[in-house]
Amino acid sequence: MREILGRRRRLLPRRKRDGKSTLLEAALTCATEWQWPVLPGVGLQSGGGVWGTGPRGCSCPHPDCVVPGAHPFDPGLLAATTDARMVRWWWRNRPTAPIILATGGSAPCALSLPAAAAAEALVALDRMGIRLGPVVATPTRWSILVAPYSLEVLGELLHRQDWVPSSLRFHGEGGYVALPPSETGTGPVRWERAPLPGSAAPWLPDVEAVVDALVRASTGAPGGGSRLTY
């Protein structure tokens, strides 16, 4: 199915499905149809627990976790897979676990920035006629998925910039991004720009096409975009 330019329609949740079934189905779509390596995130403590800081505390043993629920822990990031049997086993045993995409290699990479700056960046990119792929959103940060890039390519792109705000983060080899419809400590993960349904993997722009606009948007954010906001 062909992608269409500009803002794309969002995938509607399937009816008569609970959140647990939806998470498993979404993980299987990523792994088997799109060949994106995924694994379950650490998840949240229901009541804060020993390690959490409240009802949305992370299940990991770090009380000051900056990405509560939305990161790998056990299994670790290297366990990410596209194997359907493994994905089913994980989410049948941990049906509410967030879906974590292991970025880099042959998988998508991502650039993320605070939500307000990201919204401005998307408007600017649309105005420039730049075609975007999927965009993942949480209440605090948005992640623009891009085609895989190497550290060398990224280094050359950033070297051209006068200044790169610390609020702009790069998720390449060894990185990760939480995918919809996960629930994290900062709130639900959703598609701001959803992939179109179909068997083909979603189209992704090259990082070169978007990095300049994202740097400008981050620099123009309140406080100069210098604060790293998760």
Image: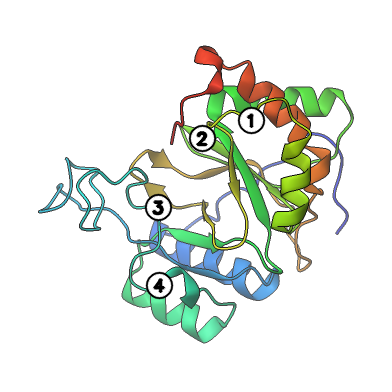
Q: Are marks 3 and 2 in contact (CB under 8 Å)?
A: no
Q: What amino acid is found at the position of numbered circle 4 in the picture?
A: Trp
Residue, x 57% and y 83% (percent of image)? 83
Q: CA distance from mark 4 to mark 1?
A: 38 Å
Q: Nearer the viewer, mark 1 or mark 3?
A: 1
Three-letter code for the amino acid on which mark 3 is drawn: Ala
Q: Residue at x 46, y 69 (%)?
A: 77
Q: Is residue 130 left or right of residue 61?
A: right
Residue 220 rendering spot, x and y as whole percentages: 63, 15
Q: Who is closer to the viewer here, 58 or 156?
A: 156
Identify the image quadrant of residue 142.
Answer: top right
**Label 2 vs 4, first from the N-terminus:** 4
Q: Earlier in the sequence, mark 1 or mark 2?
A: 2
Residue at the extreme bottom of the image, as rendered: 85
Eyeballing the image, is 16 above or below 87?
above
Depth check: give the residue in front, 170 or 70. 170
For mark 1, what is the residue? 164
Task: Please give the residue where the numbered disc 3 appears in the rendered image.
Answer: 70
Q: What whole-number distance in Å separates the C-alpha atoms at marks 1 and 2?
A: 17 Å
Query: What is the CA distance from the residue labelled 4 to the residue labelled 3?
Result: 15 Å
> What's the CA distance linking mark 2 and mark 4?
25 Å
Q: Earlier in the sequence, mark 4 or mark 1?
A: 4
Asked if residue 195 lies left or right of residue 60, the reply is right
In front: label 4 or label 3: 3
Name the residue at 71% across, 69% down: 106
Q: Residue at x 47, y 61 (%)?
A: 99
**Label 4 neighbour load within 10 Å: few <14, some 14-19, many 20+:** many
Residue identifier under label 2: 141
What residue is disc 4 on?
A: 91
From the viewer's perspective, is residue 38 above or below residue 54?
below
**Between marks 1 and 3, how big is the CA–CA gap?**
25 Å
